[in-house]
Amino acid sequence: MSEAGGTAEKTGVKPRFTAAAGLALALFVMGSLVLLLGGNGRAAVSHTCSATDRQFVSVAQLNMAALGSLSEDYLHGDAKPADVIDQTQTAILGLRNTDPSDPSLSKTRKIMRAMFVEYARAIRAHARHKNPGKYIYRAYGLANFAHDVLADAQPALQQHGCDVSPLL
């Protein structure tokens, strides 16, 4: 092995080692700062109940009811898959046209939009005689996540005049 070859090998390893050491140092510094500055994991969330928040709650409630009814009809053979998919698109558009100012409602809006997308994928898969399981699993997981966000925020939202119980 020549010296030039040995130098090339050492040069190829050194930057990786330096990057790994730099990353480890950065993680150590960040961890130390969090511990020293007293990060307790609880961020202060300021809840609101603006007109746009109430609009979101109304639109979400209406879309959940419409999709629930149409889904029941679909399960009983009284609605076509295209009807359910159209309703999910209407729900997504309806939520897109809202802009809640409350952070919990804003997060719920994003989660619900993703939930409707996954539900539409499930219906589409079922209509094509494919397994809709993974999409349904995701949709229900997202629904549970949205429920948890709303349940945690419900007391504070209620104090500000927003009733999210119809969405729970």
Image (cartoon, rainbow, N blue to C red):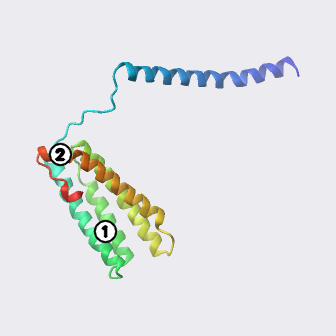
Between disc 1 and disc 2, the foreground one is 2
Vertical placement of residue 142 versus 131, above or below = above
- Locate residue 35 relative to residue 51 in the image: left or right: right
Residue 42, located in which quarter of the rendered image? top left
Q: Position of residue 94 (x, y in %)?
A: 26, 59
- Mark 1 falls on what kind of element? helix
Q: To which residue does mark 2 refer? A: 155
> Which sits in the foreground, 140 or 119?
140
Q: Residue at x 50, y 75 (%)?
A: 129
Q: Residues within 10 Å of mark 2 (few under 14, many from 20)?
A: some
Q: Position of residue 146 (x, y in %)?
A: 31, 52
Q: To which residue does mark 1 refer? A: 87
Residue 10, located in which quarter of the rendered image? top right
- Locate residue 107 relative to residue 56 in the image: left or right: right
Vertical placement of residue 142 versus 49, above or below = below
Q: Quadrant location of the N terminus? A: top right
The amino acid at mark 2 is Pro
In whole angstroms, how far apart are the C-alphas of marks 1 and 2?
31 Å
- Locate residue 95 relative to residue 16 in the image: left or right: left
Q: Residues within 10 Å of mark 1 (few under 14, many from 20)?
A: many
The amino acid at mark 1 is Gln
> Which sits in the foreground, 104 or 1?
104
Instruction: Please count the marks in the image.
Output: 2
Vertical placement of residue 15 versus 87, above or below = above
- Mark 2 falls on what kind of element? helix
> Which sits in the foreground, 166 or 103?
166
Vertical placement of residue 91 versus 44, above or below = below
Residue 76, located in which quarter of the rendered image? bottom left
Q: Position of residue 16 (x, y in %)?
A: 65, 26
- N-term-proximal mark, 1 vs 2: 1
Q: Position of residue 127 (x, y in %)?
A: 45, 75
